Image: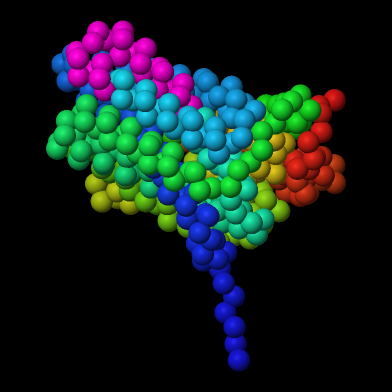
Amino acid sequence: MTTTRETPLRGLLRNPLFRRWAVANLFARLPLTMNLLTLVLVGEVVTGSLATGATLAGILTLTSGLLAQPRGRRLDRRELRAGLRRDLLVSAAAVLVLAGAAAAGSPVWVLGVLSAVVGVASAALLGGFRALLVPTVTADEIEPANALDAVFVEVAFVAGPAVAGGAALLIGPIGVLVLQAAAFLVAAWVVGGLPVRPPVDDLSRAGPAPLRTRGATSVYLLAFGPGLALGGWEATMPARLEAFGWEPATAGPLLALTALGSGLAGLVAANQRDPLRHGRMLAAVLFLAFAAVFVPTALASTLVVLAVALFVVGVPIAPLNALAGLALQRIVAAPRQAEGFALYPAMILIGAGAGQALAGVALRVLTPSSVILVAALIPAVLGVLVVTAIARRRALGLPPGVGYPHDPVVADPEAAVAPA
């Protein structure tokens, strides 16, 4: 008689609490990925200018990125499930007020303030959900759950703009804002059935702040770098498509190929066992691969080749995000993980915003292909730096693992020790 060993992913999907967490996470994440297109269209409706909407979206994104860490720290000081539910309800209310102001034709400065309020309310949602994943699944399920969360990022990346665009055709941009508020409300209802995580009364006794935790700072810096590269690359793709005679707007649907490649790679990563054991080596490989796959998108001479290249660009993204998320869980003190996880996407967003701005300047003096090749240098440099760090650690007799217990210089995050 033979028995088949159940894969980690299949075992995870049998967990009803994880399925509930996944639904709540998706409904919370979806309106966040709808924001850019929705606000651009809202700006056009109210003022007749797409640029106004882009400014509103920028205000929301910047506010959310800058306040992610303090908002995450606030979640750590309260019971996490209740804190998430409160933030979801406040986010829904803020979006509804923004919709009402837009419908009333309010001045742009009012819409800007309200966009910032939405950014503040939703700043820590992603980090809070990732922190709540820990009590939701078993210790054996955390690795595939972490990888699947990276897949959900790509699902939302594709579904959010698609839902926003389709719904805008049916109910208008202001109606889409109401739809986003409804998604937050659904998430608030579903999250009520998830496990609780007790609050931390005194953060000074709950371990060091994430940015001051040994091993975590490098993870955040390595999040900023890919965000910088990807932001520059994405901002350049509309101009790159013009070389093929296509409208710049077609970049949106074509970039869905990148999300598809990332999502499929994330499913493969979900079946990896203990990826942190050789975490630095895996990170180096992924960074160097990330640099290499940028190049075909700059050099492709036909649209078919470009489409294949766009798909391949996504392959390293979800595995990198999964590796970083798992590393933070094994590095940042458990009572401060809502703050720690909130800071990770914030660093990506800040990097992406900087990359988009730099690409806008660079396109004035360089061709789109040249800008993409320059962007490819960023993950290449990161890969070389990680390889150098591995060599230096080997000389000191340290392993290439990441986080506790694979890195002997990292403390057990479950032991809340006050910083020295």
Which residue does the image show at 35% across and 39% down from the upper left?
A: 183
Q: In this view, does 26 lie to the left or right of 166?
A: right
Check residue 114 for magenta coloring: yes
Nearest the viewer among 144 and 176 is: 176
- Visible in this render: residue 111? yes
- Identify the image quadrant of the C terminus: top right
Quarter of the image holding residue 5?
A: bottom right
Which residue does the image show at 43% across and 22% down from the upper left?
A: 119
- Visible in this render: residue 251? no
Percent x, y of residue 3: 59, 83
Percent x, y of residue 416: 78, 36
Check residue 115 for magenta coloring: yes
Nearest the viewer among 309 and 102 is: 102
The residues colored magenta run 99-123
In the depicted structure, whether residue 352 falls above or below residue 18 = above
In the depicted structure, whether residue 100 falls above or below residue 29 = above
How many numbered marks does the figure carry? Answer: 0
Which residue does the image show at 59% across and 36% down from the upper left?
A: 80
